[in-house]
Amino acid sequence: MYSALEGGQLRLFNDSEVNAIHSGVVRLLEEVGMKVKSRQALEIFERSGAVVDPVSEIVKIPQTMLAKAIKTAPSKVIIHGREEKNDAVLEKSRVHFGTGGTVMYALDFKSGERRTTNTQDVRDLARLVDALENIAFYVIHTYPADVAEKDVDVNRFYWALTNTTKPIMGGMYTMQGLREAIKISEMVAGGADKLRERPFVSFITLMVSPLVMDWHYTDFLIEVAKKGLPLAVPSEPLAGATSPVTLAATITTNLAETLAGLTLTQLVNPGTPTLIGTTSSIMDMKTGTYVAGAIESSLINAGIAQMAQHYDLPLYATGGQSDSKVHDAQAGYESAAQAMTLGLSGANWIHDAAGLLECCTTVSYEKTVIDNEILGNVLRVLRGVEVTEDTLAIEVIRKEGPAGNFLANPHTAEHFRSEFFIPKISDRWNRITWKENGSLDAHARAHMMAEKILEIHRATPIDPKTRNEIRRMFPGIRGEDLE
Amino acid sequence: MGKYFEEISQNVITAKQDKVKELTQQAIDDGVDPVEIINSGFIPGMNVVGIRFKAGDMFVPEVLMSARAMAAGMDLVKPLLLGREVPSRGKVVLGTVKGDLHDIGKNLVGMMLESAGYTVINLGVDVPATKFLQAVKDSKPDILGMSALLTTTMLGMKDVIELLKEEGVREQVKVIIGGAPISKEFADKIGADGYAPDAGSTTELCHNLIAR
């Protein structure tokens, strides 16, 4: 089971820098404003006292409105799991890692070839997440290309809901699909009130950088906020392209955008559980494209995490990715450096942290298992070094004495499992044993582990009656339920 | 009578030393044959420990704690054997070769072997070839295990094997070696019967050599 730990050991800014960034945010929202393309949103902003120019669609958000939204938005958001033990309590600097995307391609588990993703990927990756102890949640990260576009949302949420009891979050493609996803979630919960009480699904909308609220996503945002379900409102400025190249400016732009989204959720429905967010990264100056595995992405995220803690708002953040195309050293070191940075920043809901390759376009089963191991290392660091009378163990040292040996002392048996991270993928045998075991590399070992999980693991099922009811009501759901 | 065995086994596995002692005493008071307590209580428990260790579900310190729980029960049983032999998988003489003072690895091997049901005679560190020879002659072990951590001392293993040959006792005993610089090739070259890359696999090596 995942256990959340405190991050926040990494501090990028002193107090005066925090204030400078905040006043930058206020100036962007008050003086430059957001371009808002949703009619509904323009009306809501206008009604609530923002300065709205209907021709240019520019909305200027006064400081007081922003301050009020920050106040009415909950400082603690619980993203529930279908089973309570998996609830993710997001606040302060409590860290949770999970998947994210959304990608169109997978490295096929059997052939290793890149292919388009399908409903079976949504199902099987959910099971993998359900089984892996260092992954806290399932942000649905594949696009099922084997179903019609109108059925994508309902398929994504159905296969997620039936194959993991960890918290589920996802982006949406159509308004109809969003409503269907909410409907099946309500059926699984046993009613709309029950779902609102313990929402185990939540949604992602987004702002478009720089400083735009698109009509499509903004209408989704309003729909979800009306329902009172949790939602994330991230934005994704790319330093050097859709925000200035300087990281301070990118952080400030990102904050202005996501706080504009937060303001709208609070105007629609004060108290809506909202995660401000970032999926920011940089534009690579050699290729002129977005890159996911850049360490600067993690610096931007860490800076925003510190600001989110300053605002006392939970944060949806991004990290633990690689731009490599294969399971090589680059895939490992980029993912690890990002995940460690994000963990130490104390971001609350760190998505994209498991399974991604190739600039957030490709998912891999083996990489998911390898990332679980990376995250185990990160979580071990976050747990820190416990200092108590028992862990100082002066009496144990006294007993064994100089030239003694602690291996057979009960203190060792009692503590090693909590003091040491016990790897599942790393090979620590000597060369001879490693050779006897087949001279496998990390990728091959991860493949074996994923294979075993996929073969045997089943999430606690939903009520079969409800399941049949859903399948009957939504014939667009495609694929085979596992027994 | 049999009711104690399963519970004793379980408590050996979970390393509940006090519980093992208590149950063993109860069994003794109930008139259970002490040899049966060992064969049907302690050893099946340690067998499970061995299986779990191999599968990676239990770790070295936990195996040692289980062995310690078994030993606590064994202390109660042993005086009652009245000259009957303690059931044992085999006898192993262990030592670190001359000039080498490293003993953690060798001691770990000893503990793992004891926990798997072997009788272990530990000669300590800096053991000269003559002392190994004497132990083979006196104790008649099934297996002689030598350890070395240094490339400068590992050659002493060859001297011991040569001495055993000269004295005509080489065929009486299986010789196994281990330690960081040791390899399968080295073991073959000096005429040892076996080599294990780590303490855990020494147990299996000994099982195989004795079964042969």
Image: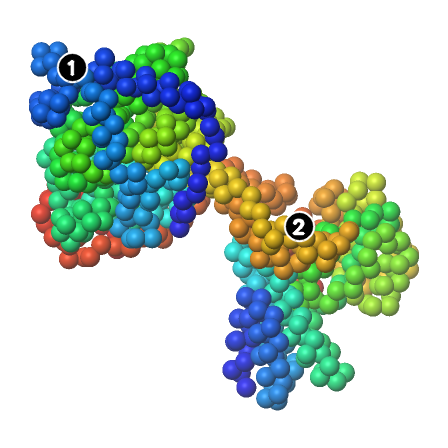
User: Crowding near pointer 1: few (<14 within 10 Å), some, many (20+)?
Assistant: many
The quadrant in which residue A355 appears is top left
Q: Residue at x 13, y 44 (%)?
A: A183
The x, y position of residue A88, in whole percent, is: 33, 45
Can residue A123 be seen? no
Using the image, determine if residue A74 lies above or below residue A388.
above
The x, y position of residue B210, in whole percent, is: 70, 64
List the residue tagged with mark 2: B198
Q: CA distance from mark 2 to mark 1?
A: 70 Å
The x, y position of residue A461, in whole percent, is: 25, 55
Q: Residue at x 20, y 44 (%)?
A: A158
**Tell me, what colour scheme is on the image?**
rainbow
Chain ID of residue with mark 1: A
Looking at the rendered structure, the kind of residue marked 2 is Asp
Q: Please indicate whether residue A187 sits to the left or right of residue A380 in the image.
A: left
Q: Residue at x 40, y 44 (%)?
A: A4
Using the image, determine if residue B18 lies above or below residue A40.
below
List the residue tagged with mark 1: A58
In this view of the protein, which residue sits in the foreground, B192 or A22?
A22
The quadrant in which residue A436 appears is top right
